Image (spheres, rainbow, N blue to C red):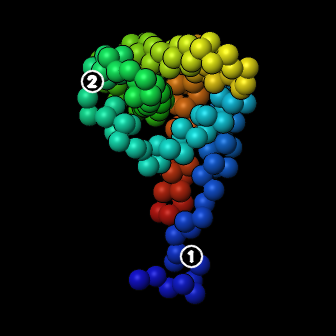
Amino acid sequence: MTDDSNPRARIDTDVNLHAFFREALGLALTERNVETSPPTEHYLVALLVDFVHPDELAHEAFDRPISFLLADAMSRVGRERFDRLRALGDAVLFTSGFFKDHFETRGIRLQYMSSLGARAYDGAASMLRTADRKSGSDGPRAPELFEELADKFTAFVHVLGSVADGFFARSTQAGDAGTE
């Protein structure tokens, strides 16, 4: 039980994660000199927020080999195929950015991970381009978001790596401050 009269005793559950990650991502994009469109930047912020509590499809990326997940996604049709490709691209991007050292110590090259993640996003973009052609849509161009994610996949991995490094640095500083 917490003492509600002592604000230091409570955990702040009203943290605005979108604002927090928007700031962290903006700093990392600037640090890495990576230009991105506003929709893609918004998507990356949402990806970071989503991985605070990953969904079932994201968990699969931690449980099964990525190449099997890509083959599985490509064997699906319709909305399920799109959802699996998008989720796979998201999971590979996040894990490659935040846990690159983990993969490298196991002999998995970033280039390999990036090619699988980019392929997943490219597959999602292709599905959206096909749907746009069939519908004659002139509205917002979602395929371009996934094309940008595919084309700049490795750059975005490094950006998320910078975000992760910032978190680790802050947590180390906070730990050091608590030991003084």
Give whichever of 147, 176 is nearer the camera: 147
Residue 115 in the image: above or below residue 1: above
Categorize mark 2 by other alpha carbons within 10 Å: few (<14), some (14-19), many (20+): few
Classify 10 Å Cα crowding around label 1: few (below 14), some (14-19), many (20 and above): few
Q: State the residue position of label 1.
A: 8
Q: Are marks 1 and 2 in contact (CB under 8 Å)?
A: no
Residue 124 horizontal side relative to residue 107, left or right? right
Q: Specify the quadrant of the image occupied by residue 159.
A: top right
Image coords of residue 4 (percent x, y): 54, 84
Left or right of 8 on screen, residue 55: left
**Is residue 77 placed above or below 115 in the rendered structure?**
below
Image-based side of 16 in relation to 85, left or right:
right
| Closer to us: 159 or 87 | 87
Pick the front one: 6 or 174: 6
Residue plotted at (63% across, 56% down): 16
**Residue type highlighted by circle 1:** Arg
Q: What residue is disc 2 on?
A: 65
Q: Position of residue 143 (x, y in %)?
A: 61, 19
Looking at the rendered image, the disc whose residue lies closer to the viewer, 1 or 2, is: 2
Q: Is residue 12 above or below residue 85?
A: below
| Gap in angstroms between the C-alphas marked 1 and 2 | 43 Å
Q: Does dot 2 land on a helix, a strand or a loop?
A: loop
Disc 2 marks a residue whose amino acid type is Pro
Residue 29 shows in the view: no
SS assignment at label 1: helix
Measuring from the top left, give residue 123's x and y in whole percent. Answer: 47, 15
Q: Residue at image x 59%, y 34%?
A: 44
